[in-house]
Image (tube, helix red, strand yellow):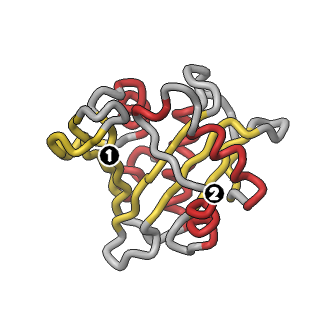
Amino acid sequence: MTALRLRRATEADIPFIMETERKPGYDQFIGRYSLDEHRAHLADPAFAYLIGENAEGSALGFVILMDLNRRDGNACVKRIAVSSPEKGFGTPLLAGAVDFAFLETNAHRLWLDVVSGNLRAQTVYRKVGFIQEGVLREAALLPDGSRSDFLLMSILRPEWAARRG
């Protein structure tokens, strides 16, 4: 697994985040926010913006967690993206974000939804311990106007703890 470290994003990271979420082909699977939306979410304690960096401090990707303040402990991986796909950054980036969620917050369940056709992401999610819970039929509206299913996946704190040994 590629070594990377996670840190909290700052407003100075927003251009990198926006550039990454707007990479060609990402519009099929990764949402995007405006500058104002990113600024608002970055300042909101219910969100955590995390940047994955290599040993030299170069940003490799980001994760946005949300709903971190829910009383029921259901937090969400809202967005994860790497700047260069298929280089092995996704799995350690997500694993670090999961560790962050369970070590730094009161999250009990970390969930996400993924477009059914995004097989690369599904592979990463399963590697980290996410389990498919169900299907949200035709819930995803793709940029071309077509619809796709969302797969609902999650990992629970006890499952994460068991994987850590």
Specify the farthest residue to the bottom. Answer: 71
Residue 87: give x, y in percent of width and height. Answer: 61, 21
How many residues crowd around disc 2 within 10 Å: few (fewer than 14), some, or many (20 or more)?
few
The residue under label 2 is 35
Mark 2: amino acid: Leu
Q: Is residue 71 above or below residue 13?
A: below
How many residues crowd around disc 1 within 10 Å: few (fewer than 14), some, or many (20 or more)?
many
Q: Report the side of 85 relative to 163 (left or right).
A: right
Specify the farthest residue to the right. Answer: 56
In front: 144, or 23? Answer: 144
| Residue at image point 22% right, 45% down | 139
| Residue at image point 79% right, 37% down | 58
Q: Is residue 146 above or below residue 103?
A: above
| Residue at image point 64% right, 65% down | 39
Mark 1: amino acid: Asp
| Residue at image point 54% right, 33% down | 90
Q: Secondary structure at mark 2?
A: helix
Q: Quadrant of the N terminus?
A: top right
Q: Is residue 50 above or below residue 104?
A: above
Q: Is residue 15 above or below residue 90?
A: below
* Residues at marks 2 and 1 touching, judged by CB atoms closer than 8 Å: no
The image quadrant of residue 150 is top left
Name the N-terminal-most of marks 2 and 1.
Answer: 2
The label on residue 31 is: none
Instruction: Kindly report the distance in space between the C-alpha atoms of the residues bearing marks 2 and 1.
Output: 23 Å
The residue under label 1 is 113
Residue 144: give x, y in percent of width and height. Answer: 33, 30
In front: 26, or 136? Answer: 26
